[in-house]
Amino acid sequence: MAVVVPAHNEERRIAACLRSVRVAAAQVAPLPVVIVVVADACTDATARLAARGGAHVVETRGHNVGLARAAGVDRALELLGDAGQNAWLAMTDADTTVPTAWLTHQVARAGEGHDAVLGTIRLAPTTADAVLVARHDAAYFRTRRFHGAGGAWEHPHVHGANLGVSAAAYLRVGGFASLVTGEDRDLAARLVATGHRVARTDRHPVHTAARLRGRAPGGLADLLVSLHPATGPRATPTGSDEAGVDCVRTPGVPGGGKSVRDVPVRNL
């Protein structure tokens, strides 16, 4: 099994990410888990801290998340050797922490015959502005009401921060494309189009940091703009939060924080 984490200047968050991944990996022991961090176009200490955190580090210069994820998978399969063809590949992001049962749930879905697992996200508790969170969640969870109180929510979302795929299926569809954004949705679309069995689950959501200035175009920054109130106090940048990440504050909201780092909600 492998966990691949692309990172661009994430020295403030990579340690927490890797701590959570190691805890999740311990839950699937004795299954070996290889952790690969791809430090893409980093000018900070991300690579050094990732290595200190027990990850195998690949350094790239493309400033391209699709290429970074692909490079990470290539390295993971190389490290796994002959076991790679039967491996499970779990993806998350460097500004994200995963729950303890994250890998356990993915292994279970793989055991049921799924070729890929698409999970959901939540706001990191310390990076939440009540107004923006409410607006985001109204859209994000919009389709959940159609599944009833006890029904499983087969959500419409795709997040590179919470995605798993068998190595065999990944290789059959050609892996991650060299896209600067949307590489996760592109991979998922090809898996579905080629008849692979894909599980969409809300059982193991990850916590993702919210940002004003996102790492990829078409991501958080655009989403925040779309969620700004049309009237009244506007959310405006006011510097950085405790982790040094640019955030959005809404005047009058206690502890005003940030909205979720997510791609625009589609197909709701």
Image (cartoon, rainbow, N blue to C red):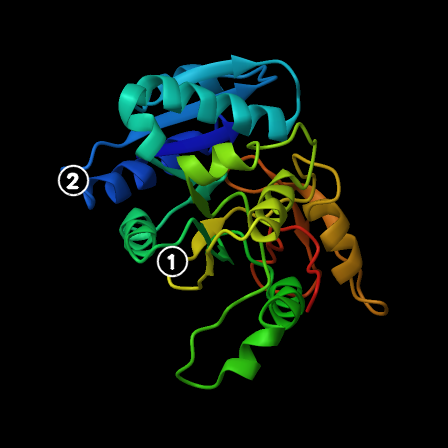
The residue at the far right in this view is 231
Q: Quadrant of the N terminus?
A: top left
| Residue 62: quadrant of the picture | top right
Using the numbered discs, state the Cα–Cα distance from disc 1 to disc 2 in whole angstroms: 18 Å
Residue 76 in picture, x, y percent from top left: 38, 23
Question: In which quarter of the view is residue 77 placed?
Answer: top left
Q: Which mark is residue 204?
A: 1
Please identify the quadrant where the C terminus is shown: bottom right
Of the pair 90 and 215, the residue shown nearer to us? 90
Q: Return the residue at label 2.
A: 29
Residue drawn at x 66%, y 27% as measured from the top left: 178
Task: Measuring from the top left, give residue 87's x and y in whole percent.
Answer: 33, 34
Amino acid type, mark 1? His
Q: Nearer the viewer, residue 52 or 199?
A: 199
42 or 81, which lies in front?
81
At horizontal 75% and vertical 61% (from top left) the residue drawn is 227
> Of helix, strand and loop, which one carries label 2?
loop
Left or right of 154, for residue 261: right
In the rendered structure, which amino acid carries the disc numbered 2? Ala
